[in-house]
Image (cartoon, rainbow, N blue to C red):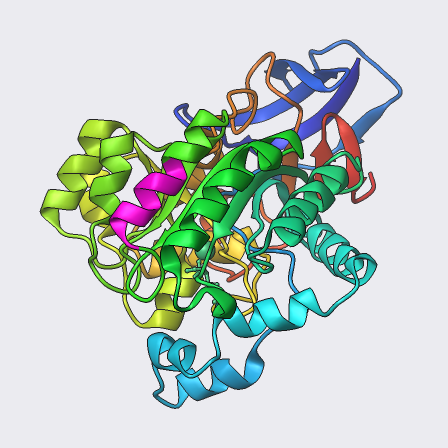
Amino acid sequence: MKAIRNVGRLFTPGHEVRRDVDVLIDGERIAAVVPAGTGRGDDDSFDCRGALVTPGLIDAHTHPVYAAPRLEEVARRAAGASYSEIASLGGGINATVASTRDTPIEVLQEGARSRFSRWLEQGTTTLEAKSGYWLNHTGEIEAVRLMAALSADPSLPRLCVTFLGAHELPAEFRDDRDSFVREVESWSEEAAGAGAQFCDVFCDQGAFSVDEARAILLAGRRAGLGLRIHADEIALTGGSHLAAELGVASADHLLRIGDAEITALKRAGCTATLCPVTALNMGQLPPARSLIERGVPIALGTDHNPGTSGTTSMSLVVYLAVCEFKMTVDEAVTAATWGGARSLQLHDRGLIEDGMLADLTMWDADHEGAFAWEPGLRAMAVWRGGQLVKGSS
Ligand code: NIG
Ligand code: FE
């Protein structure tokens, strides 16, 4: 039995913070949380010296495999150009698709690997990771396979892989949308076999319509994939209602939604995954308080991608959820742990309770208020399945 000793404050969603405890770990799981100094002695223990420990953070929305960020475009947007304008001029997702298709897979894999280790360094132990920068059969399946392979590396965070073949209409299908939609539908089964757990669609103005998204998501469901959707980010086009109709696990972004959409999401039991860095980048905030007040469970994501969000720091995301979305610290940390697990339908993490995976983060603070004080609070130690993967005693 391993022990993480002298936790000054142990934050776990749904419970009062516990002070001065030890976390006992058996193999890769939490065995017990006991008052400090009362657990069975063991040489293999780590002294937290009174620091704050939370479940390892869970990033519920990322696009991590791509050739290079589109920085020139980001600067143009900062000077007033819109995301849609840039995309219609050949920039946006299709620009990343062109450069990603031209880059050897080994190079992309190394890029993804180094990003994944940054996530872990910053206290994230699970992240959702989407394909979507090939938009062709071979590339999309290869992306899924690459991420599934990296997921087995115990020095990286755990990955939950999402097949996003419908991220954008690729240039070569500009005059034949229907054929592309049918193509993506036909890839789902292989994506599931290659290690994808979810199917996602960018359902929005300039991307895919509600009818197209429905067809693709239903094909994903037939292939055994869970469902998530990019909904109502750029314009209110009906993605949230589709999310509710299909009972998806997660409806993401939701920058443009109103009361009717919130009611539909609540009824359907969908988790709302909000991405504050993108929201700020796009200049539009989602109705986070209304979602919370109406009882819609919230998850948070960095939405790391080459166009609208370069961060890999979930503690920065928690900071922004508090300061910009007006969530309480408790709500934001809960969304970044339990909420993420719920949105990914992973019931073995996101809480510090007996039997859960021992995925934990110790922070450079002795109180969770620090998340709202220091943008990007530093992780000092990280455990994945009971193994210390960052920090030293
Ligand atoms: O979640 N909205 C679609 N996908 C990303 C943006 C991807 C990109 O611009 O490359 C997002 O914001
Ligand atoms: Fe996204």
Tell me how many marks there are. Answer: 0
> Position of 20 compared to 5: left or right?
left
Give the camera-side residue of 214 and 123.
214
The residue sitting at 20% across, 42% down in the picture is: 241
**Residue farthest along the bottom direction in this orientation:** 79
Give the camera-side residue of 297 and 166.
166
Q: Quadrant of residue 388?
A: top right
The residue sitting at 76% across, 39% down in the picture is: 149
Residue 232 forms part of the magenta stretch: no
Above or below, comparing residue 148 to residue 211 in the picture: above
The residue sitting at 56% across, 81% down in the picture is: 71
**Residue farthest along the left direction in this orientation:** 260
Can the viewer see residue 68 in this picture? no
Where residue 321 appears, as percent x and y from the top left, is 38, 54
Where residue 299 appears, as percent x and y from the top left, is 40, 41
Above or below, comparing residue 15 to residue 220 in the picture: above
The residue sitting at 70% across, 51% down in the picture is: 116
Give the camera-side residue of 260 and 194.
194
Q: What is the quadrant of the N terminus in the image?
A: top right
Where residue 145 appears, as percent x and y from the top left, is 70, 41
Can the viewer see residue 192 in this picture? yes
Give the camera-side residue of 201 and 375.
201
In magenta, the rendered stretch is: 209-217
> Position of 3 compared to 238: left or right?
right
> Position of 18 compared to 143: left or right?
left
Q: Quadrant of residue 182?
A: top left
Q: What is the quadrant of the C terminus in the image?
A: top right
